[in-house]
Amino acid sequence: MSGRPTAPALRAASLALLAWAACSGAAADPGDHYVTIPSRPGVRVGYWLMERPDATATVVLLPGGKGGIGLKHGVPTSENFLVRTRERFAAAGLDVAIVGRPSDRAELDIFFRKSPEHVEDLRHVAERLRADLGKPVWLVGTSLGTISAAAAAIALGDAIDGVVLTSSVTAPRSPGAVENLDLDRIRVPVLVVHHRRDACRLTPPEQAQSIIDGLAHAPQKKLVLLDGGADARGDPCEALHWHGFIGMEREAVDAIVDFIRNGRPEPAARAPSRGS
């Protein structure tokens, strides 16, 4: 015997995966798959790719925490806000790439997220997605992922088309506070989304305006403070609390999609914003 799975076994495995995905709330589009590409010497970085035929832009989703996406049975299973809402982004007509950890890192801490090595990883991802999909590329970070998104936006310039920061690290004394980065070097549109009741010590919502204030050269910038939701539970810094927009997923994604579609000016109109 060759040891290869039989056709019935393959069908059974596929059905099992579909059933698992349905129970987890994730649509199992047969075209969705995990991609790994070389980034730095001896290092590869991976992302879960969801390409949609009607897409008008590509969102590069950067989860918080340790930077993992919870890949199990070939499907992301993390409860992170951006991972669990990926189907909403895809349904809104966006290509989606959820970036995981590079092969040389067990976790993405605050300091690595600001490092040239991490920026280089994200540069390769953005370039590959632009080349493969031919769409504008937006970085979307949440929680610690906002450090990644902001640092990359500072370094990559017009290699990306815009940035979205959700539940940003805003505690002034944190070594990862986004407002303490060189935000005046960002020259693409920026959306900041925060929950008014976010109780995480690293992401106080009253500091979110400081990010907007630092974006001196962003052609357009906007702060959205959401309120509402239901069933917040667990650690206030985790995904199933207000920090992760629990019960407000639709509103949060809608705000992001609307800004990507309508919030950026035409290329010739890139000028300092007249307000937030």
Image: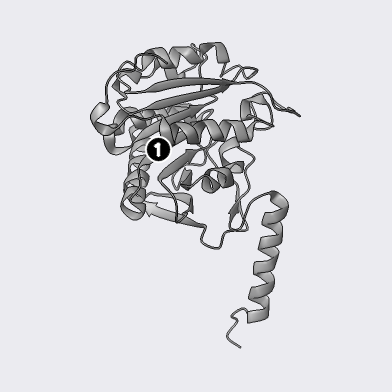
Q: Give me the residue at 36% from left, 18% from top.
A: 215
Badge 1 crowding class, 10 Å Cα cut-off, few under 14, some 14 to 19, many 20 or more, is many
Q: Is residue 113 visible?
A: no
Looking at the rendered image, the quarter that the N terminus falls into is bottom right
Q: Position of residue 159 (x, y in %)?
A: 29, 38
In the image: residue 84, left or right of residue 183: right
Tell me how many marks there are: 1
Q: Is residue 255 left or right of residue 72?
A: left
Q: Residue 84: which quarter of the image?
A: top right
Q: Position of residue 6 (x, y in %)?
A: 63, 81
Q: Which residue is mark 1?
A: 138
64 is higher (above) or lower (below) than 92:
above
Q: Nearer the viewer, residue 259 or 100?
A: 259
Q: Is residue 212 above or below residue 108?
A: above
From the viewer's side, name the closer residue of 45 and 89. Answer: 89
Whether residue 126 is visible, yes or no, is yes
Q: Position of residue 250 (x, y in %)?
A: 62, 35
Q: In this rendering, would 79 be left or right of 126?
A: right
SS category of the residue bearing label 1: strand
In this rendering, would 44 be left or right of 78?
left
Tell me where residue 118 appears, x and y as whole percent. 38, 37
Image point (55%, 63%), residue name: 30
Coloring basis for residues: one colour
Placement of 100 over or under 199, stated as above or below: below
Farthest residue to the left: give it: 268
Location of residue 262 with respect to 42 vertically, above or below:
above
In which quadrant will I find the C terminus? top left
Q: Within the image, what quadrant is residue 11 found in?
A: bottom right
For the point 74% across and 28% down, which residue is it?
230
Q: What residue do we see at 32% from left, 15% from top?
A: 216
Q: Amino acid at mark 1?
A: Trp
